Amino acid sequence: MRLEDTQGKIFNIQHYSIHDGPGIRTTVFFMGCPLRCRWCQNPESQGFDPVLFFNAEKCTGCGQCVEACPEGAIQVIEGKSKTDRKQCKGHGDCVEICPYDARSLMGRNVTAAEVFEAVKADAIFYKNSGGGVTISGGDPVAQPDFAISILKLCRDAGIHTAIETCGHAKWEILNRILEHVDLVLYDFKHMNPAAHQDYTGVSNQLILENAKRIYHALGLEMLARIPIMPDCNDSAENLKMTARFIADDMGRSVKVHLLPYHRLAETKYEMMEKPEGWVRTEPPGDDGMQEIKKMFESFGLMVTIGG
């Protein structure tokens, strides 16, 4: 099969991005992720099936979606439609029939050729800014063949390639993908294995092993991305362990981006009708972020807040 014909699932292509690698970039957001972070900023991407977004403010309780749903997963309760998420299969019949645009579907099937055409359309911006394409998610490791096809098409066209990943994949899979990558944006969630299991659903052992192999065996340019979640991973002990691992077990050439938690994803959880199950916390303050930055810099690391 031709690279162009490889099929995969995405939920967004973001143009003119300046936060997912150098220069102006096009970021392709994949469906599917091996982690279930309790602070996930893209919860609609965790699985592979399309995810229904529901805007309760637009719903009038007309009931047309109830009749349209082939699974019988929708009821009208107290003047608003309510979807049984366990029954919903994401067919989208309710989306098409809703006269008030209260429902939308996140996630779609595309070919590598379709993604490449969208990426290639921004080529002039990459040339002028030193940008390129970044595949993100979700996590591209969940769709390795699709990721490889897109990356190879871009590489062959002279487009700089980057991947944002949590690194939780067998080395054989990760290594195949990274053959076509210029820059690795690597996420570090928590250094304590038990806490990592609690907050993400998996241990961090494979993630840390892969981080060292990427840096030492492949010699790829890496950028460490660390979400700062108050009351979850922002303790001095955990942050020092993270800085020490990057500086000593990898190398001080790895740049660090500290990503302060923001509340933009809360609307997504509400639209997925999942008010429970994610971490609710306040974003860290500017002074606190500056202190964390100084601590990481004390390990000889180059650090940026945001990115």
Image (cartoon, rainbow, N blue to C red):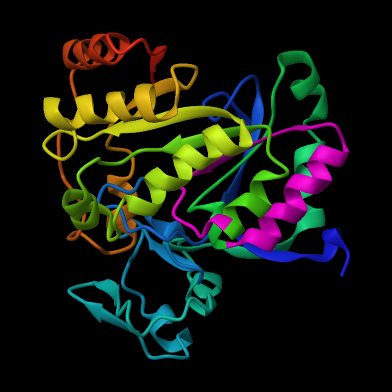
**Which residue occupies 73% across, 43% down?**
180
Residue 53, visible in the rendered structure: yes
Q: Quadrant of residue 232?
A: top left
Of 154 and 294, the residue lying toward us: 294
Q: Point out residue 244 in the picture as x, y percentages from the top left corner.
A: 29, 24
Q: Point out residue 254 in the picture as x, y percentages from the top left corner.
A: 47, 22
From the viewer's perspective, is residue 292 above or below residue 260?
Answer: above
Q: Quadrant of residue 221?
A: top right
**Which residue occupies 42% across, 90% down?**
71
Of 280 and 246, the residue lying toward us: 246
Q: Is residue 250 left or right of residue 11?
A: left
Residue 156: in magenta span: yes
Q: Quadrant of the C terminus?
A: top left
Residue 259: in magenta span: no
Q: Quadrant of residue 13?
A: top right
Q: Which residues are magenta?
A: 143-171
Q: Point out residue 225 in the picture as x, y percentages from the top left corner.
A: 41, 31
**Which residue occupies 27% across, 64% down?**
273
Q: Is residue 138 left or right of residue 221?
A: left
**Which residue occupies 40% across, 48% down?**
207
Q: Quadrant of the N terminus?
A: bottom right
Q: Point out residue 47 in the picture as x, y percentages from the top left corner.
A: 45, 67
Q: Is residue 40 left or right of residue 150?
A: left
Residue 235, visible in the rendered structure: no
From the viewer's perspective, is residue 118 above or below residue 96?
Answer: above
> How many discs mark residues in the rendered view?
0
